[in-house]
Image (cartoon, rainbow, N blue to C red):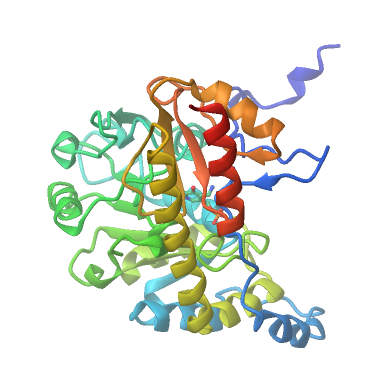
């Protein structure tokens, strides 16, 4: 009997996302999934402990306290905020709610949604999952998004700012061009890495009814293990996301995650300290590796995208792995001679520089 016939035909469309490896053979310096190298704010401990006795109750389906904390941090009111189980889940709801099948034109589904050719590799996965037509727009040779290249009919636009894995950031004036051209479509800005030096679009949220910002606490607040992400947009966009959520899972953010997230967001001093340290380490690391023949794109993220003038990226990746350092190499056109290296502690990055110096002379 052919057991593959148990699956629905729609399964054939899926090409799952592959996350960075997590080998168990030995202890590595893990610089391949853009995690924060510092532990979360110490204040989450008491917040988690005091929530334990409430675990017999379902969490608030609308995560009100968490939305309040996020709203206050972003300078908006809570009805501008939607929370989910990691920003990956929020992104999947964004794809479902806004892209592909718009009703604004006479030919629904006729225009593709747009995102860069080199970008977060979950986007094409969600597009396939929901059967959304998409078109990728090439970055220029310096890995920059060129807004004018997006001036074509679409069912919506998404891109990370800073972009991943390139680390390059767009400025407000450039994003404004996208928002204005696509004013009848949603332009989603995935600000997963905005804490590390870029300018957030949050302050323009009232100006653009088509602007949706997606963020995560995974990187900026050292909570990758907790799974909390959110979107900020005008209430009509937020209620569309809520409608998707309530058709999928009423309680995506559990009580422990919500309590920890509120504590982490509220501890701004700790957040400022850890992000400043990461930015500082990034700049030092960039300086060090430029000296040994690396080119590095202008990073506003907690990772850098590097390539060496003579030694190939796959060779360097193997040498780094042998030396106990994990980084990410994408075997894809245009970027297969690059490595994405997450910024760890100063000690981690000094060791990475030392290993690179040995093999990339
Ligand atoms: N967006 C981008 C651009 C990312 O790189 C990631 C992390 N892989 C995410 C979203 C998802 O983050 P999380 O689900 O941990 O919130």
34 or 71, nearer to the observer: 34
Taking 255 as reference, is 166 left or right? left
347 or 111, nearer to the observer: 347
Q: State the quadrant of the N terminus.
A: top right
Corner quadrant of residue 153: top left
State the image coordinates of residue 41 (x, y, percent, origin top left).
61, 77
- Across the whole image, how many numbered discs are drawn on residues? 0
Q: Residue at x 59, y 82 (%)?
A: 263
State the image coordinates of residue 332 (x, y, percent, origin top left).
46, 22
Taking 215 as reference, is 6 above or below it? above
Taking 126 as reference, is 322 above or below it? above
Corner quadrant of residue 118: top left
103 or 315, nearer to the observer: 315
Q: Residue 240: tell me if it is visible.
A: no
Taking 117 as reference, is 125 left or right? right
Taking 298 as reference, is 228 left or right? right
Q: Residue 145: tell me if it is visible.
A: yes
State the image coordinates of residue 290 (x, y, percent, origin top left).
38, 40
Taking 212 as reference, is 40 above or below it? below
- Residue farthest to the top, as pictured: 1
Taking 15 as reference, is 305 left or right? left
Corner quadrant of residue 257: bottom right
Q: Residue at x 41, y 51 (%)?
A: 97
């Amino acid at each position: 009997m052919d057991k593959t016939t148990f699956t629905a035909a729609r399964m054939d469309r899926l090409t799952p996302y592959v996350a960075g490896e997590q080998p168990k053979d030995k202890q590595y310096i893990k610089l391949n999934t853009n995690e924060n190298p510092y532990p979360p704010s110490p204040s989450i401990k008491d917040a988690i402990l005091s929530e334990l006795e409430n675990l017999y109750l379902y969490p608030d389906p609308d995560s009100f306290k968490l939305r309040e904390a996020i709203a206050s941090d972003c300078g908006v009111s809570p009805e501008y905020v939607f929370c989910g189980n990691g920003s990956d889940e929020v992104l999947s709801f964004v794809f479902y709610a806004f892209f592909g099948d718009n009703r604004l034109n006479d030919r629904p589904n006729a225009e593709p949604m747009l995102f860069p050719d080199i970008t977060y590799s979950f986007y094409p996965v969600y597009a396939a999952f929901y059967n959304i037509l998409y078109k990728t727009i090439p970055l220029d040779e310096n890995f920059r998004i060129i807004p004018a290249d997006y001036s074509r009919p679409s069912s919506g636009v998404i891109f990370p700012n800073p972009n991943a894995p390139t680390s390059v950031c767009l400025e407000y004036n450039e994003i404004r061009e996208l928002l204005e051209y696509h004013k009848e479509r949603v332009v989603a800005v995935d600000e997963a890495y905005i804490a590390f030096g870029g300018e957030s679009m949050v302050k323009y949220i009232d100006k653009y009814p088509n602007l949706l910002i997606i963020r995560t606490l995974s990187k900026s607040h050292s909570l990758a293990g907790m799974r909390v992400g959110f979107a900020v947009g005008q209430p009509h966009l937020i209620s569309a996301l809520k409608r998707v959520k309530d058709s999928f899972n009423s309680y995506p953010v559990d009580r422990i995650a919500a309590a920890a997230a509120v504590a982490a967001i509220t501890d701004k001093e700790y957040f400022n300290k850890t992000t400043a340290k990461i930015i500082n380490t990034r700049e030092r690391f960039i300086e060090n590796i430029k000296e040994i023949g690396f080119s590095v794109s202008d990073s506003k993220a907690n990772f850098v995208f590097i390539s060496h003038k003579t030694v190939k990226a796959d060779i360097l990746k193997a040498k780094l792995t042998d030396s106990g350092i994990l980084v990410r190499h994408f075997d894809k056109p245009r970027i297969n001679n690059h490595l994405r290296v997450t910024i760890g502690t100063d000690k981690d990055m000094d060791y990475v520089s030392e290993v690179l110096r040995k093999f990339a002379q």
